[in-house]
Image (cartoon, rainbow, N blue to C red):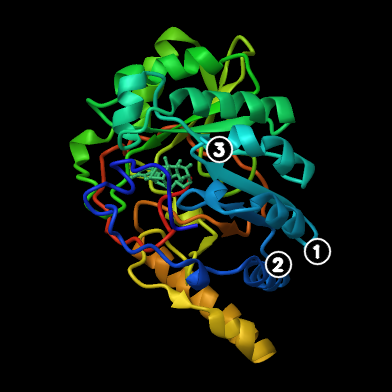
Amino acid sequence: MDRCNFRCPYCMPKEKFHENYRFLKSQDRLSFDEILRLSRLFASLGVRKLRLTGGEPLLRTNLADLVGDLTMIPGIEDIALTTNGVLLGQHAVDLHANGLRRVTVSLDTLDPEIFARMSGGFAALDQVLHGIDAAIAAGLTPVKINAVIERGVNDHTALDLVERFRGKPVIVRFIEFMDVGNRNAWRPEMVVPSRELAARILARWPMHPVAENYRGEVAQRWRFDDGAGEVGFISSVSQPFCGACSRARLSSEGKFYTCLFATQGRLIHDILTSGQRATAGHGRRQRENADQAYRCGRGARALSAGRQRGAARQRPAFPERTGVRHSHRGRRHGRQADP
Ligand code: SAM
Ligand code: SF4
């Protein structure tokens, strides 16, 4: 879904995504049938994990039906959903009943005023908190929370999130503010490097780094010494993880991207109509694009469908290089940042 019910300034600033902004018409969006057919093709090429994101995925009517159909695809082992949480309270039970097992909710702060500012003027904090509770009650656990941290905006409230969710079936993950384009006024000094944030948390709650769950996991995991769970750090700016990225992204209009910062996607509607030959060519092109994106070495990742194989391994928690790196701009309909 390219549309969203929020206007987070770091993602879809109001100045650009105003009331006359031309989002896709519903007939120009991939239908559920098209998404399913493409997902089957991706699964046959080795994709094991799918993530539904946006824009706001829960704005798509009957999304739980799509989840149910995706779970039936042979080879797909994991389906994830990233949402701003506003509509989660209404849909959590249905999503779980249709096979969703986990959810990521974006929540940058518990301060109502800062929340409104960071969501583009929406006073929906209570709805999001209700959505998180509903997800826990429905069994979509552990719920992951994505918090984008901007210096001088919400960094002073980061520990409140940890305090609220420690000891609950919730993993708070802090994301470095990325320059993902569309005039989000990104400046390097607004990034709070994970190392700095981790030190602030560590000073209050002793914790230690733990190994990643699988190769290419984007969040660096830290577990509290007292057993009250863990937090994660997504250091896309200070420690870009392009080298281990195996993700690709399919936009609402059917364009395929191998990198969040790619300036061009490939329209792959043709695969739906031209059969096996196009499928084989696509596989080759996907590898070529992946190589190209890797060579770019850009400081972020795209995520929607990913091949995540290989043994879990320990990576250094926060190596010395923590300087903020500038990265390129480039975003399309429904292809915003998505940790
Ligand atoms: N609307 C849904 C949501 O907010 O969870 C899904 C789409 S949103 C683009 C996916 C994730 O990207 C969210 O967790 C959001 O915080 C993150 N994100 C968007 N813009 C970002 C930026 N400039 N820097 C870092 N993370 C960003
Ligand atoms: Fe919408 Fe998510 Fe982007 Fe915020 S981060 S504007 S909720 S798509």
Q: Could you say where residue 78 lies in the image, as x and y percent from the top left?
A: 71, 50
Residue at 68% across / 67% down in the picture?
A: 36
Direction front: furthest residue: 20
Residue at 56% across / 54% down in the picture?
A: 60
Check disc 2: other Cα within 10 Å, few if <14, some if 14-19, many if 20+: many
What amino acid is labelled 2 in the image? Ala
Circles 3 and 2, Cβ within 8 Å, touching? The answer is: no
Q: Which residue is mark 1?
A: 74
Q: Is residue 209 visible?
A: no
Between 159 and 72, the one lying in front of the other is 72
> Is 237 left or right of 106, judged from the image as shown?
left
Q: Which residue is mark 2?
A: 43
Above or below residue 51? Residue 174 is above
Between 37 and 22, the one lying in front of the other is 22
Residue at 31% across / 24% down in the picture?
A: 114
Q: Which mark is residue 155?
A: none
Q: Could you say where residue 138 lies in the image, as x and y percent from the top left?
A: 73, 30
The residues bearing labels 3 and 1 have C-alpha atoms spaced at a distance of 29 Å
What amino acid is labelled 3 in the image? Leu
Circle 1: element type? loop
Circles 2 and 1, Cβ within 8 Å, touching? The answer is: yes
Instruction: Name the quarter showing ligand 1.
Output: top left
Q: Could you say where residue 289 lies in the image, as x and y percent from the top left?
A: 46, 73
The residues bearing labels 2 and 1 have C-alpha atoms spaced at a distance of 7 Å
Q: Which residue is mark 3?
A: 87
Labels 3 and 1: the sequence-earlier one: 1
Between 239 and 74, the one lying in front of the other is 74
What amino acid is labelled 1 in the image? Pro
